[in-house]
Amino acid sequence: MTADGIAAERVTRSLGGRIVLDDVSIAPEAGATVGLLGPNGSGKSTLLRLLAGVLAPTTGVVTLDGERLDDVGRRSLARRIAVVEQHTDTQVPLTVLDVVRLGRIPHRRTWLPSSAEDDDAVGAALEHAGLTDKVDRRWQTLSGGERQRVQIARALAQQPRELLLDEPTNHLDIQHQFDLLNLLVGLPLTTVVALHDLNLAAMYCDRLVVLQSGKVVAAGRPEEVLTEELIERVYGVRAVVTLEPEGHPHVRFVRAGRPARSALRAE
Amino acid sequence: MSLAQLTRRSRLPLVLLGGVVALALSIALAITFGPANIEVGEVWSAVVARLGIGESGLSAIRDGIVWNLRLPRTLLAAVCGAGLAVCGAIMQSLLRNPLADPFVLGVSSGASTGAVLVVVLGAGGGVVSMSAGAFLGAVASFAFVLLLSHTLGGTTDRVVLSGVAVMQLFSALTSFVVLTSGDAETTRGVLFWLLGSLSNASWAEVGTCFAVLAATLLVCAGYARSLDAFAFGEDAAATLGVSVARTRLVLLCVTALLTAVLVSSAGAIGFVGLVLPHAARALAGPNHARLLPVTALAGAVFLVWVDTLARTVLDPQEVPVGVVTALIGVPAFVLILYRARGAR
């Protein structure tokens, strides 16, 4: 099977003797936004690191346009796939512009200064992320939401076709979570994003992949995947799932133990 | 908004030109200081005469003072200052540790152990000189650090921890050798390696150090952009297309080699490699294509003046240059960190 874009085929990965990913296959459609769901430690971050080529699978292959990542080469890979990590920080006193320019590293030749093409890509990325008025701000003075936007702008400056993000909405207030996801789904890129919030995933993703203990337990359109039965099985919590008028499912969690306690009192 | 207006790229040639002029003036001026009164003009004519253009018109003694004593010493100071500062800047970026300096890989303690072994135990049977012994010790300790950190997993924090461990080991070895078999002569020799001194500078040493410095700068300039990519860690660098393992190995090896060569000529001159990169960063920004040349020039000018101070302030006695770098370096370091705190 020669897939277009990025694909993992039956990948397994063990870390420190423990299997963190077990026989996982994923092949996002071009231009789609794929949400990775699952509890902590289910293997979301490891799968993203495998797709990024930072970590090699123990068995199985990750391919880009049908070619193994090993054979693609680091620089070519960085021109196709951009990664936004979950925790990013630096001691270096960088400005927003400095950070976004890092995204041009895979495109630049060693001894030459940056080209007009580089400057255009950086300018477009800043504009996309809504950062044009913040170029001179120091990284250390930015809020969590601003830092995520800067990292996304840096990723866009790489001019990738695939974008991988590990829980980008973590630690953001609700408004910034929506801003960020609106920005992501508006991009003409194949996006794989690990998310914690089931409702955000349902609203913004075209497809969802649910991981549990390193295995894929469900995959498909949000309304197919997010069922009451699956949420109970994977997360161990009870939920009521309804379909919103817009067509995506909505998850309402039910507080554990409540019906039992009220039943006791009634007796 | 034009991005071109925001770049400081266009100012770089001017800054570098200014730095080169400042360095040339510093060297010429520094040579005039000392017991024998020598004018800048005399320095100039002595150098010109040696290059075969024109007559010096100086007496043989004055010409000897300029050409055989002060000029090689001042040039060695410039080369050591530049080399140590650049090694410090690279270590700090590569290991993502603002406290890293050229000696973080145990090179200086290995050098002193090597020197002491030659002097005290006669290792090498008289064929190996003290500075050659220092060089071999430095290379041995660095190889040990590399091996240890590789065994422990190869990540940058392992490199730092291995360096600290090896440094302690070699310091203990040096102390042991000196305590069990040392005399006053040996102790003075050890102090030389620990505090640094440029008093034995010769043209041969200037040549060797300069050649290694030039080669190192060339390699590091090729890796300037990869070093930029390390700002957010090794994984982030890898996703920007940088070959992390190769970059780390190449840069650790060339900086350790340069440090070993410098230390075996001038001892372990402290604080230049720690403080100057921070000062240069305040001046040139974090971009390594700008930062590395500015760091080299700043380090060179700094050590030229520090050595001039060290050999004149208590004339006729010489203060070890490492003592002066620390006395100036500590307050400067505090000041830089204090200002950085305000900017955060």
Image: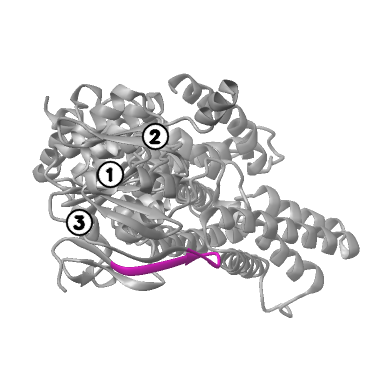
State how far apart marks 2 and 1 are (Cα): 23 Å
For the view shown, which residue lies furthest in the top direction? Answer: B342
| Location of mark 1 (residue) | A102
Q: Nearer the viewer, mark 2 or mark 1?
A: 2
Q: Chain of mark 3?
A: A
**In the picture shown, does residue B115 fall above or below B198?**
below
The kind of residue on which mark 1 rests is Leu
Q: Chain of mark 1?
A: A
Q: Residues within 10 Å of mark 2 (few under 14, many from 20)?
A: some
Residue extent of the magenta highlight: A9-19
Q: Secondary structure at mark 3?
A: loop
Of marks 2 and 1, which one's residue comes earlier in the chain?
Answer: 1
**In the picture shown, does residue A178 fall above or below A20?**
above
The kind of residue on which mark 2 rests is Asn
| Location of mark 3 (residue) | A28
Q: Nearer the viewer, mark 3 or mark 2?
A: 3
**In the picture shown, does residue A21 fall above or below A184?**
below
The kind of residue on which mark 3 rests is Pro
Q: Magenta stretch: residue B3 in it? A: no
Q: Are marks 2 and 1 in contact (CB under 8 Å)?
A: no
